[in-house]
Amino acid sequence: MSIIEGGITAAKGFLAGSVCAEIKKTDSDDMALVYSEKPCVASGTFTQNKVKAAPVKWDKRIIDESAFVQAIVVNTGIANACTGDEGLESCAVMASETAGLLNLAPENVCVCSTGVIGPQLPIEKITDGIKRLPAMLKETRAAGTKAAAAIMTTDTRPKEYAVTCDIGDKTITIGGMCKGAGMIHPNMATMLCFIATDAMIKKELLQKLFSEIIDDSFNMISVDGDTSTNDTAIVLANGMAENELIDREDEKCAVFKEALRQVATELAKQIAGDGEGCTCLFEAQVHNAKTKKDAKVLAKSVITSSLTKAAIFGHDANWGRVLCALGYSGADFDPEKTDLTFESEAGSIVIMKDGNAVDYSEEKATEILSKNPVRAIIDVNDGEHSATAWGCDLTLDYVKINADYRS
């Protein structure tokens, strides 16, 4: 597997475009279109919040019932959530308008929205934007990056990642883009994530692999503990690499799965590292837990602890906050067998051994915690299972950003 430059347009046959439809209060692009030259098998995962945005309902039906998907149209600024029948009708209009311009059927188009919850979409601005999008479609890296920027809300930078791998005598490419900086505590995926591959793979198998991968990537990140109404992750596969069909869990499937996992994990980490107001990515590794579930629960408890996140922002090696977060997680572990090490590019330092502080340099610890990213390595010495979760520090700017989000 090789990491390459690129994102949503990296794989063969995928194009992207973006326009400014004046949905947001800026003059930046706020609509994007992803299009495949060939029909795609598609899989998706969606928010488990009981309050589901209209696009989530639309896309879940499309993924479940349609034979193929060939386009995804996205708007930012307004989430189209808590908008009732009018919101669902807006999804149908977006899909129908996009389909008509691309010679598709509405059931071949996924629709996504992100932004403020509650308002109805300004449908005239939306349809005007859609009419201009096909002319902007390009297969270039720049077009993909512009599309990744167009789907941002409070993000500070576009998020892209791509890899290639060999399956038999064919090279396949997987690339993706995502957005998310606040309201990030996924229970399936993330705010919005789109992954495209030219691999030829069976739809049911793609869904199985993607669901498993989501659980170890996007489900292991958190910024603020809030699960969005619009969480959507979609992967499209158009088969243009012309590899031997991946239709069962064999060696070629394992190669593809690892490449897809790499893309999903790196995109997830980019979201965690761009949390609203944050200054660093905070990673928690848990090792030697009794079960995989315990390892996951412990790791995520640490990166979601507000006190721990604040300590990371203050570059304070306050190990008691980490141990406390482990203790209330609900996972089974023995505090008196637990070790903690902090690590960054400045080095590593053992902070706690067998549940007690060790003699360490506060100055060195502060230096380590001043870098980006920062890792907490936690060994509970009670089994053989490991897990990693990703979050960010908690800063004053997080409160400022969310205090005036709508204004």
Image (tube, rainbow, N blue to C red):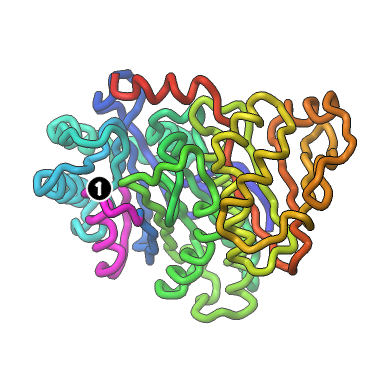
Residue corresponding to mark 1: 53
As shown in the figure, which amino acid type bears the numbered disc 1? Ala
Residue 335 placed where, x, y %? 72, 54
| Rendered image quadrant of residue 367 | top right
SS label for mark 1:
loop
Q: Which residues are magenta?
A: 48-72
- Residue 70 is inside the magenta segment: yes
Q: Is the residue 292 above or below the residue 116 in the image? A: below
Q: Tally the marks.
A: 1
Residue 319 placed where, x, y %? 72, 38
Residue 71 placed where, x, y %? 31, 52
Q: Is the residue 380 above or below the residue 157 in the image? A: below
- On screen, residue 86 versus residue 143, left or right, reads left
Residue drawn at (62%, 36%), measured in percent from left and top?
308
Residue drawn at (68%, 68%), measured in percent from left and top?
290
Query: Which quadrant does the N terminus fall into?
Result: bottom right
Residue 5 placed where, x, y %? 61, 42
Q: Is the residue 240 above or below the residue 249 in the image? A: above
Q: Is the residue 246 above or below the residue 271 in the image? A: below
| Nearer to us in this view, 338 or 49 | 338
| Nearer to us in this view, 313 or 354 | 354
Residue drawn at (48%, 64%), measured in percent from left and top?
210
Query: Which quadrant does the C terminus fall into?
Result: top left
| Rendered image quadrant of residue 291 | bottom right
Is residue 109 visible in this depiction of the protein? no
Residue drawn at (88%, 29%), measured in percent from left and top?
361
- On screen, residue 393 versus residue 54, left or right, reads right
- Residue 355 is inside the magenta segment: no
Q: Residues within 10 Å of mark 1 (few under 14, many from 20)?
A: many
